[in-house]
Amino acid sequence: MKRLDLSRISAFARPEEHLTKQTLHGAIVTLLGCTLALTLFCHELSWFLGAKGVAKMEVDLRRRHDLSIFVDISFHAIPCAALSVDIMDASGTADSDVNFAAGAHLHKFRLDASGRRISKAAEYVQPQTQRVLREGSSTVMSVDMEAAMRHIGDMEQEMGAHEGCRLRGDVTVRRVSGRLHFAVHQQSLADMLPQMLSGHVLPRVRNISHAVHRLTFGPSFPGQVSPLDGTTRIEAANGGGHAYKYYIKIVPTEYTTRFGMLLETSQYSVTEYAMPLPHRHAHS
């Protein structure tokens, strides 16, 4: 009876001894092969890391989602209690952070007279002095007098200390033409009413000095240029004040990474106007 030899089915068969002999020719072929592989690897790596950006422009006919605007602006002479942000667009939407607009996630931080953040003061929370009540097809503005008086007290205190405000956060708007308006509360009738009833008359804010730390439309991407970033406008202490208007044109942008990931964002261009403020108005 023959003995079963399991070594015949081994998948790791050893080559013959004459095939494993190392020679000079084999060493030369090995070095040439390694050199060629290393050269090709370095070439592909340099091409991958040094890829050039390609820009392409085309007409945008798609209906896109809402636009997210990120703002980071310091107002050197407008206290947080006096600063409001109004959102208006061509579709008829009009909202404000006073009414706690659903699309606005803005944070206000108090600054001292030197422009430094007041460490003892937490984020300033705006009292909700106004409420929009909708009754059928009509809209009625309701003023909370208690909250309004508390708001006036905040403005008096911050104006007396010559405070400023840093506004930071994001606002979601529709993709239609509109305005993002940084204003002073006391200019509206609803805000002036508590002052007239209580006998408090707050001084008008006319110094609209500001610094734009960052303004973007949509997610950031490598190589993005934001024309307003770093813009600073300082008013003279005894000047008459100016209204600064920035007309911005937004261009939808698609950024594709070298890994094929698509990022939908926007770029913009800007035109700036500065007009002297009339004595009866003060806004930015």
Image: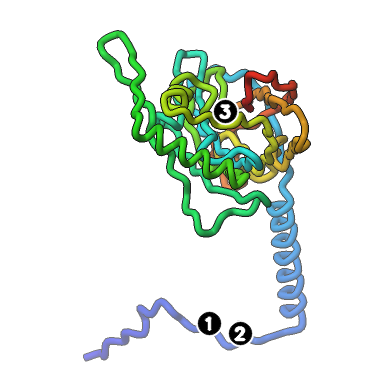
Q: Are marks 2 and 1 in contact (CB under 8 Å)?
A: yes
Q: Secondary structure at mark 1?
A: loop
Label 3 amino acid?
Ala
Which numbered tag is attached to residue 119? none
Q: Secondary structure at mark 2?
A: loop
Label 2 amino acid?
Thr
Q: Residue furthest front?
A: 199
Q: Quadrant of the C terminus?
A: top right
Residue density around tag 1, few if under 14, some if 14–19, many if 20 or more, within 10 Å: few
According to the picture, the residue beneath numbered tag 1 turns out to be: 15
Q: Nearer the viewer, residue 151 or 70?
A: 151
Kindly identify the residue that appears in the image at 70 percent across and 54 percent down. 49
Up the image or down, 16 lies above or below 116; here it is below
Q: Pinpoint residue 90: horizontal percent, then vertical percent.
A: 51, 13
Q: Pinpoint residue 60: horizontal percent, then vertical percent.
A: 58, 20
Q: Is residue 281 visible?
A: yes
Q: Nearer the viewer, residue 56 or 272?
A: 272
Kindly identify the residue that appears in the image at 58 percent across and 41 percent down. 159
Q: Nearer the viewer, mark 1 or mark 3?
A: 3
How far apart, in angstroms, are the residues tagged by discs 3 and 2?
A: 85 Å
Which numbered tag is attached to residue 20? 2
